[in-house]
Amino acid sequence: LVSAFTGRKKLLEIYMTAIDQKLRLFSFGDGMLII
């Protein structure tokens, strides 16, 4: 669902940034922020 708004390339960039910053987004299921 999130990739429908951002596109696959941007979504992967966001996930990689979150993983690099040690955010635990996988521990809590899917999360989405719409600005």
Image: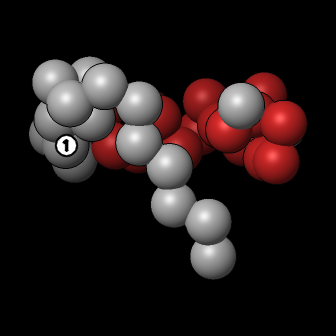
Residue 29 in view (yes/no): yes
- The residue under label 1 is which amino acid type? Leu
Check disc 1 and report the residue beneath it.
Answer: 23
In the picture, measured across the screen, residue 18 lies left or right of residue 11, that is left
Residue 27 against residue 35 in the figure, above or below: above
Q: How far across and how far down the image is residue 22, in percent? A: 15, 39
Q: Residue furthest bottom?
A: 35
Pointer 1: residues within 10 angstroms few (<14), some, or many (20+)?
A: few
Q: Quadrant of residue 4?
A: top right
In the picture, measured across the screen, residue 2 lies left or right of residue 14, that is right
Viewer-side residue, 24 vs 12:
24
Q: How far across and how far down the image is residue 29, in percent? A: 31, 25
Label total for image? 1
Q: How far across and how far down the image is residue 8, in percent? A: 78, 28
Residue at the image point whose x is 51% and y is 60% from the top = 33
Residue at the image point whose x is 61% and y is 30% from the top = 12
Q: How was this image coloured?
A: secondary structure
Residue 9 in view (yes/no): no
Q: Quadrant of residue 25?
A: top left
* Label 1: element kind: loop
Residue at the image point whose x is 41% and y is 42% from the top = 31
Quadrant in which the N terminus appears: top right
Quadrant in which the C terminus appears: bottom right
